[in-house]
Image: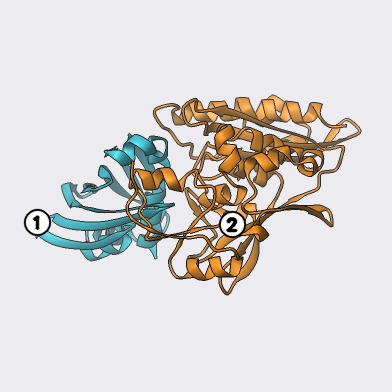
Amino acid sequence: MKISGTNTLALAPEEAYRRMQDPVVLAACMPGCESLETIGEDEYRMKMKLAMASLSGAFEGKVRITDRTPAGFRLIVEGTGKLGFMKGEGLLTFSQSGDGTEVAYEGDVQVGGTIAAVGQRLIDATAKMMIKRFFEKLAA
Amino acid sequence: MIPQQFEYSAPKSLAEALALIADGGKPLSGGMSLIPMMKLRLAAPDRVVDLARIAELSYIREQAGSIHIGATTTHHEVESSAVIRAKCPLLAETASFIGDVQVRNLGTIGGSVAHADPSADYPAALQALEAKIVIKGAASERTVSADDFFVDTFTTALEPGEIVTEVIVPVEAASTGTSYQKLLQPASGFAIVGVAARIQKSGGKITLARVGVTGLSNRAFRAAATEQALTSGTAVQAAADVVAQAIDANSDLYASAEFRAHLAAVYAARAIDAAIRRTS
């Protein structure tokens, strides 16, 4: 499922760019992220616990950063658990917007397994909510 | 299709239930959402607290211009209640659109509201009715508006340990016209879009317009732009066309965001037209 949007942060572009590559910040901001451990350059092992409505489950996976340019980079998050698997990747670009930064993202979310079989109609809304929470925490 | 092992409690009083829930128990009402999730092992609560045997949570009462509905009142009870049909027909009509007859016989208003599925039917009507939701925890009690209650997809104003105990809707003036119109997903019965409209007219003019929308986005909401257009004399279709304005529409395999926004305008026009015809 394609996903795209923009979010304005009350941070300077350099600061927004830096924060979104900092594993400590990413771990704190990604909804449900329990740990993020460096396993290589721009590559991290992630443990995540998803709890939404009556649904709850643990995921293990990776977070990677690629295609780094001065304007932005690509963030790839993938995880597998008993409930199924998910993979999201988004190209993030940063631009000045007033005193803050506009972060534009464009990418793709894939979800499979039981969770997708029964929750197909909710993937879009859930992905949007998680992205929104991520940016809310990032700005805080 | 066999859930993981869990402990089951069926308290008879609300106080007992709230103590168990404060202790980490997962409240179970009609079980129309939670049980399928447990059978698929997408949900695996350690303890389930069944609210069905708490007599003090199942009632429909008219009181001082409002109708108070206990949380474990089923959709069928709402749909067939003489009081609700006569005095808050929008809610009875909306209940009649939920799922199928088996779901309506077991599913409850409190369960639906607390679950906050973004495609559930009740939230559209509760937004249009400016309903109030009563929330209780072991040490808390508060009442919030429907608009404040539905925060996001599956996210409500409920704090851990709290449950919905009552829904309060207004007694409708006899002259008000209301309607709920929905396009349903044929497999699940959920609304692809659903629109609830309440209209009052005076001297040929619309004096009150309330439009609640579900299924379109992350949460059920009141379409303020459409309401304002209606009360300022805009034609119904033109007012309905702005229903999805500034809304980030959801998309799934069944309906893209663009198609959903279009459907919202079509169903808003139908609901508003039907509501206008029912005014007197």
The image shows residue B235, relative to residue B108, as above or below, that is: above
Report the Cα–Cα distance between label 2 and label 1: 57 Å
Where residue B266 appears, x then y in whole percent?
Answer: 61, 25
The residue identified by callout 1 is A41
Label 1 marks which chain's residue? A
Q: Quadrant of the N terminus of chain B?
A: top left
Q: Colour of chain A?
A: cyan
Q: Is there a contact, CB below 8 Å, between mark 2 and mark 1?
A: no
- Mark 1 is on which residue type? Glu
Residue found 50% across the figure and 28% down from its top: B185
The answer to which of A57 and B207 lies nearer the viewer is A57
The image shows residue A102, relative to residue A32, as above or below, that is: above
Asked if marks 2 and 1 fall on the same chain, the answer is no
The residue identified by callout 2 is B53
Where residue B53 appears, x then y in whole percent?
Answer: 59, 57
Q: Quadrant of residue B271?
A: top right
Task: Describe the element under mark 2 as helix, strand or loop.
Answer: loop
Label 2 marks which chain's residue? B
Residue found 51% across the figure and 50% down from its top: B115
Task: Describe the element under mark 1 as helix, strand or loop.
Answer: loop
Horizontal relation, residue A41 to residue A10: left or right:
left
| Chain in orange on the image | B
Q: Residue furthest left?
A: A40
Where residue B245 appears, x then y in whole percent?
Answer: 57, 36
Q: Residue furthest bottom?
A: B139
